[in-house]
Image (spheres, helix red, strand yellow):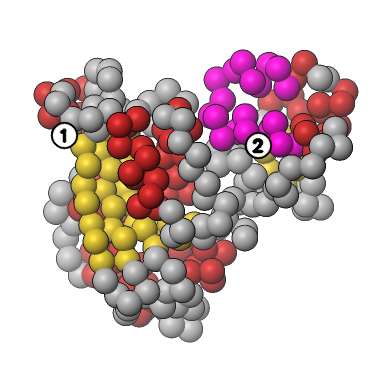
Amino acid sequence: MKLNLKKPIVFFDLETTGVSVSHDKIIMIGYIKVYPNGNEESKTIYVNPGRHIPEESTAIHHITDEDVKDCPQFKEIATDLAKVFEGCDIAGFNSNHFDVPMLVEEMLNAGVDFDITKSRLVDVQNIYHKLEPRTLSAAYKYYCHKDLEGAHSAGDDTMATYEVMKAQLDMYPEVLKNDVEFLSEFSRMNNNIDLAGRVVYNDKHVPVFNFGKYKGKPVADVLAKDPGYYGWMMQGDFPQNTKQVLTKLRLQANGIKVQTLQLIWDL
């Protein structure tokens, strides 16, 4: 099924040095940009992380230090890459949980203002898990009736994700709408405010902490009661996006007008 698009959507996948958004680095990104007229453009980019790629990571994606030693570092491609995503919706497989936060973190570390607040985020894995819980390889086999060759290659995984989503629309016409806004909402599984889920909305739509000793407590109340907690988080091992969100909430609590906080995909 051809996607019903109001604006371009970028399907993307990352390969990284590990699974920590705060500490690890991107070493490969593959994307397919699909336009409302059906045109597609795709690219796979290798990135030098500036550090050793752990053997346990290489065992998964088969990318070695030698493979990327002459490739650009992320900061060298960040500006051009941000332009690829500008004005687009974003989709991936497990992307809301890992790929999107990882990409945002790398952009912020590179000094690039990567604003996704106007993008709809569609996580094809979440759609799949709600309807047919499986892995990407199994989803590709189930929906597309093909074996996924080159799994854990960002380019191959991206193409598979794109094909799976189109096949999902064909298979579940009574459940799914061919509309990115609907798919974004359907694939959302949490009420995160920051990408890492450290700060969330509670059932009263009040921002609360989602970890540690203040879990479930309103952010404004905690910062008023324990001002040092903000400084601890700013100095702590938290993603840059989490720190940005907390700073906005702190400013709002102090009566300073900032851009209205919204769910990162609820726009």
Q: Residue at x 30, y 37 (%)?
A: 77
Give the quadrant of the C terminus. bottom right
Where residue 75 appears, as percent x and y from the top left, is: 35, 30
Does the magenta portion include 236?
yes
Where residue 83 appears, as percent x and y from the top left, is: 38, 49
130 relative to 17, above or below: below
> Which comes sooner in the sequence, label 2 or label 1?
1
Give the extent of the magenta segment: 230-249
Give the quadrant of the N terminus. bottom left
* The quadrant where residue 248 appears: top right
Q: Residue at x 48, y 43 (%)?
A: 114
12 relative to 237, above or below: below
Mark number displayed over residue 245 = 2
Please name the predominant secondary structure of the magenta segment in the image: helix
The residue to which callout 1 is attached is: 62
Tell me which amino acid carries mark 1: His
